[in-house]
Image (tube, rainbow, N blue to C red):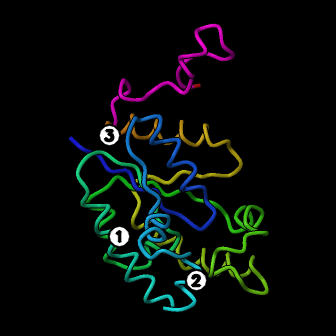
Amino acid sequence: MPIKLALIGMPGGGKSTVGRHLARRLGWGFVDSDALIERRIGESIRTYFEREGEEGFRDLEQSVIEELTNQAGSLVFATGGGACLREANRRALHTRCTVVYLRSTPEELHRRLRHDTQRPLLQVADPLARLRELYAKRDPLYRECSHFVIETGRPSVSTLVNMILMQLELAGIVEPDLVHSPVDPAQGPDSDGPAGRS
């Protein structure tokens, strides 16, 4: 049976990076909804956002979420940070996908994003205050939408992927034998570290 895994969370929470690695481990396709939107509109989200406003962008985002949640076949996809603001998106994600919330504190996000100039909502005088404001508004919505909450903290990407896979296996959503080993088989059994999950 096809499974769709959706990663949600704040901007800069690692959804795209973790999603790409997770899809590789599962042998599934990966889609970044923001990257898909940019390919469709032929420009950056920031440029579109400035011209059309947030509502115009959210309409476009909703149509992409609708499409991804209805796609045939197993898939991992990362949503934009604001995808859960609309009830229609939360409902589509929660009912059609297994939703993983990658939870990061505003302080952790600020450390990662302090030099980022591409995220429209963070182009303000005090990005940390803005992140705290966004977090206060969005964290309850992310929790409402999600089936699993993974605290990102400072673990490596591979550790986060293993944490997610362990939760999915324990819940019976993915079979353990479906998960590809993170060790490159080309390196052989004598490579550093044991095969399989640590």
Query: Is label 1 in contact with label 3 (beta carbons under 8 Å)?
Result: no
Disc number placed over residue 181 in the picture, else none: none
The Cα atoms of the two marked residues, 1 and 3, are separated by 24 Å
Residue that extends furthest to the top in the rendered view of this protein: 190
For disc 2, the neighbor class at 10 Å (few under 14, some 14 to 19, many from 20) is few
Rendered view: 124 above or below 169: below
Residue at horizontal 67%, vertical 76%?
A: 131
Per the image, label 2 sits on a secondary structure element best described as helix
Q: Upstream in the sequence, badge 1 or badge 3? A: 1
| x then y, percent, for residue 3 | 29, 46
Disc 1 marks which amino acid? Val
Disc 2 marks which amino acid? Thr
| x then y, percent, for residue 193 | 66, 17
Residue picked out by circle 3: 173
Q: Upstream in the sequence, badge 2 or badge 3? A: 2
Residue picked out by circle 2: 47
Per the image, label 3 sits on a secondary structure element best described as loop
The Cα atoms of the two marked residues, 2 and 3, are separated by 39 Å
Query: Is label 1 in contact with label 2 (beta carbons under 8 Å)?
Result: no
- Mark 2 or mark 3: which is in front? 2
Range of magenta residues = 174-197
Residue at horizontal 37%, vertical 40%?
A: 28
Quadrant hosting residue 70: bottom left
Residue picked out by circle 1: 64
For disc 1, the neighbor class at 10 Å (few under 14, some 14 to 19, many from 20) is some
Disc 3 marks which amino acid? Ile
| x then y, percent, for residue 178 | 36, 28
